[in-house]
């Protein structure tokens, strides 16, 4: 559980999307009693150990992994659908989908042509490294493939939980406030890339692209910012190049 938000992972279920059979994995949890070390520190320390194991497991297989976070409704799944349709001709892509309930997003991902597992967190509002470890064993992503983790829509605790990814990517949309990077600085500080989605809606909303980029740079000076529309495809080529650069750095297989 996350001591900050009080959510728990005890009810998390992991489902391979093309099978549609929920597999509630029993995993006994210790429930540590209150001691001098804060529960949050202990939870995060345990998470960091598992995340490092995930990172090693993924690195051993040459799998490039991105942890995608956003508020609900910023367009993560739409971004992934378009990305999969574009990339899956050249690279094998799989997705770990996180949502509190439903297999809806995993179904969209498999329809787009990628393999997917859905993690349903129940009351939980973030993914943790243990859930990813379990999901990896269900998904069994190919060596040399590209793996996207779509986190639960939430800009708060996903910032704290390393999953073993190569990079965190934050997606915001122009239907949100320009000041989002200032309100959720931990998430933006942890990001290796900020995607500003739904730029096709800029004429209709009160969103200042330049100011939002300045806000993001105020909490994360070096971070790259990519304005895109996952719906129209505008700006998506730059995103695909960003992925390619990192995949080629890892020399992922192109079949
Ligand atoms: Mg989604
Ligand atoms: Zn949480």
Image (cartoon, grey):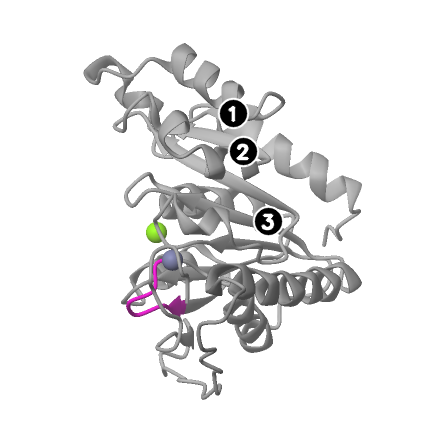
Residue 189 bears which disc, if any?
A: 2
Q: Earlier in the sequence, mark 1 or mark 2?
A: 2
**Residue drawn at (48%, 23%) of the image:** 216
* Disc 2 Cβ-to-ligand 2 distance below 8 Å: no
Tell me if residue 120 is in the magenta stretch: yes
Mark 3 and mark 2: span between their CA atoms?
33 Å
Residue 51 bears which disc, if any?
A: none
Mark 1 and mark 2: span between their CA atoms?
6 Å
Mark 1 and mark 3: span between their CA atoms?
37 Å
Tell me if residue 116 is in the magenta stretch: no
Quadrant of the rendered image holding ligand 2: bottom left
Main SS of the magenta part reads loop
Residue on which the image places disc 3: 89
Residue on which the image places disc 1: 219
Q: Residues within 10 Å of mark 2 (few under 14, many from 20)?
A: many
Spot occupied by residue 241 in the image (x, y as percentages of width and height): 63, 31
Q: Earlier in the sequence, mark 3 or mark 2?
A: 3
**Residue drawn at (41%, 61%) of the image:** 2
- Above or below, 233 against 121 in this view is above
Nearer the observer, 81 or 67? 67
Q: Earlier in the sequence, mark 1 or mark 3?
A: 3
**Residues in magenta, as a range:** 119-125
**Residue drawn at (44%, 18%) of the image:** 215
Q: Which of pointers 3 and 2 indicates the residue nearer the eye?
A: 2
- Above or below, 59 against 244 in this view is below
Left or right: 185, with 133 as reference point: left
**Residue drawn at (49%, 33%) of the image:** 188
Kind of element beneath mark 2: helix
């Amino acid at each position: 559980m996350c001591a900050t938000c009080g959510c728990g992972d005890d009810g998390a279920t992991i489902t391979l999307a093309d099978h549609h059979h929920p597999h509630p994995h029993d995993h006994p949890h210790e429930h540590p009693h209150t001691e001098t070390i804060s529960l949050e520190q202990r939870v995060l320390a345990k998470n960091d150990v598992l995340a490092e194991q995930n990172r090693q497991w993924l690195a051993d297989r040459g799998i490039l992994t991105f942890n995608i976070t956003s508020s609900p409704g910023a367009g993560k799944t739409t971004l992934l659908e378009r990305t999969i349709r574009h990339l899956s001709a050249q690279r094998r892509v799989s997705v770990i989908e996180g949502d509190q309930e439903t297999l809806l997003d995993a179904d969209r991902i498999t329809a787009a042509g990628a393999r997917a597992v859905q993690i349903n967190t129940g009351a939980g509002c973030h993914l943790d490294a243990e859930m990813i470890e379990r999901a990896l064993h269900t998904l069994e992503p190919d060596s040399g493939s590209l793996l996207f983790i779509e986190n639960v829509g939430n800009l708060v605790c996903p910032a704290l939980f390393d999953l073993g990814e190569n990079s965190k990517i934050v997606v915001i949309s122009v239907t949100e406030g320009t000041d989002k990077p200032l309100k959720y600085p931990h998430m933006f500080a942890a990001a290796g890339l900020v995607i500003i989605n739904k730029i096709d809606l800029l004429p209709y909303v009160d969103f200042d692209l330049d100011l939002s980029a300045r806000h993001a740079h105020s909490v994360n000076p070096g971070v790259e910012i990519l304005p895109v529309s996952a719906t129209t495809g505008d700006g998506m080529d730059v995103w695909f190049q960003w992925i390619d650069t990192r995949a080629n750095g890892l020399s992922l297989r192109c079949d």
